[in-house]
Amino acid sequence: MKRIIATLLIAFIGVILVRTIMFSPPEITTEDQVIIDVNADIVAQHLSEAVQFKTISPPAPETRNRLVFDNFLNWAEKTYPELHSLEKTLIKGQTILLKWPGQDPTLKPILLAAHYDVVPVVPGTEERWTHPPFGGVIEDGFVWGRGALDDKSGVIVMMEAATLLLRQGFIPERTVYFSFDHDEEIGGIEGALGVTKRFKEQGIQLAWSIDEGSFILNDIYPGMTLPVASINVAEKGYLTLDLIASGDSGHSSMPSKDASIFLLAEAIRRLRETPLPGGLEGISLEAMDAIARYSSFGRRMFFANRWLFQSMIESELSKSGPTNAMLRTTTAPTLLSAGIKDNVLPGTATATVNFRLHPRDTPDGVIKAVKKIVGDDRIEIRRREGGSLASKVSSTEGIGFDVIAKVSRQMFGPLVVIPGITGGGTNSSHYEAVADDSYRINLLSLGPDDVAGFHGTNERISVKNLGAGTAAYAQLIKIGAGE
Ligand SMILES: [Zn+2]
């Protein structure tokens, strides 16, 4: 008997080990490297000038300084005259829509989009910037300032790339549209939605669109020495709920255990302890599986034997913010309010909780799940207006995905291509209505040091990166519009 158990145990361990050893990276698809000559210093100079326009989208759109946006548009027209000789439409006066007609009108067009509005600098953080946020300083090989990554660099490298090709006399086979949007940071209601409406009116359906959402990632994943092109094929939705606890009020000298703040605190504790249902499947599984093949032996062992370790993998991934967000709809308490005086128990207490909806979830489903987790009738759950469903999931086998993957390899060398989900909202949520597929990636490199710059302090991008990005978009237009 003992011998049988020992044999079985050895066989069991053997299976796990063999599967782990076989769980290795696939042979990397490579492409012949393409070199396109770009003067990165000129691109950097142009980005520096662009950063100096304070094209800030404030939380209240009506307070937006339209004049600054007009000044930016005038600058762009003067700086990129060839580009502006294309068929141009201003949407709501401030989003530039350009059409570069293709030779074959039977082919569906493509759209390259980026936004030139930026988020404000958080008051009180100005001092923490190495260089002034709107100074556009070029120093130590970087262009510094708000928008350097999100997303004026996207605008500039696209404008540079198109100019480069126009000067060379390139004529696309497939029509190429560019949209340079002015209000992405506040939902794209005028710009991207306006472009989408216009396309619908004209009966234009795009083969694919590309906009921000990810990057060519370097040193972001532990153990991964190759760059990763995360071509995001979906984005999460947005839902905000108010949890309103009604409890015993009265004097604080004789507090009840059912005071509203106690009830609310318990509800929040439960939401923290019980994440919404989720799991490693679909796009997230495909991405994590590809990355895990390059990681440590232990991690490879887990992923190679998901039949045994799936729940352990999921609980491990759930511990970190970024990977947890890949698995499920996330739960984030963001606002609290209750009480008027330090010696009075308030009758009600409110917590506002923001959820980022995974494509598998609906708002109604989340509300139902939250009610169950909270499990207390004294807490009313009220949905805030607005929000959005998760996007549709674009194809990882579509022509656009293939073009972006191919160009990434041609321009950035050997790399791993994975699909991904963008956590925040982007203009692709509008463009997907008029595109067979919508992809979310900037063909610019991003490393761990850059991440804090998004909507944060010391946003910057390297001059070298801008040169490589311009070349990448030129190649993307060539290949994407080539046939
Ligand atoms: Zn952005």
Image (cartoon, rainbow, N blue to C red):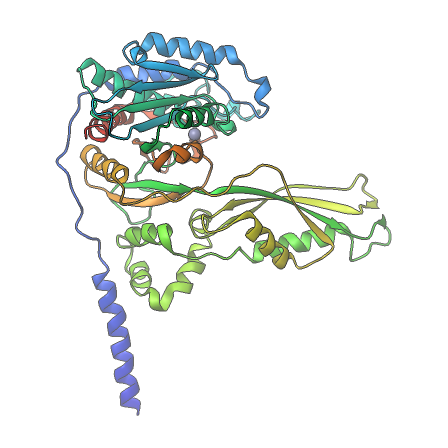
Whether residue 290 sits left or right of residue 276 in the image: it is left
* Farthest residue, direction left: 32
The N terminus: image quadrant: bottom left
Residue 169 quadrant: top left
What x and y, as percent, mark residue 6? 28, 84
Q: Against 347, is 84 above or below?
A: above
Measuring 32% from the left and 60% from the top, which residue is drawn there? 303
What x and y, as percent, mark residue 456? 48, 30
Q: Against 260, is 478 above or below?
A: above
Q: Against 369, is 406 above or below?
A: above
What x and y, as percent, mark residue 335? 64, 40
Residue 409 quadrant: top left
Q: Nearer the viewer, residue 73 or 95?
A: 95
What x and y, as percent, mark residue 304? 29, 62
Measuring 25% from the left and 16% from the top, which residue is drawn there? 163
The C terminus: image quadrant: top left
Whether residue 316 sits left or right of residue 206 in the image: it is right
Q: How many marks?
A: 0
Whether residue 16 sits left or right of residue 325 in the image: it is left
* Farthest residue, direction bottom: 1
Q: Nearer the viewer, residue 173 or 130?
A: 173
Residue 60 in view of the camera: yes
**Ligand 1: which quarter?**
top left
Residue 141 in view of the camera: no
Whether residue 212 sits left or right of residue 29 in the image: it is right
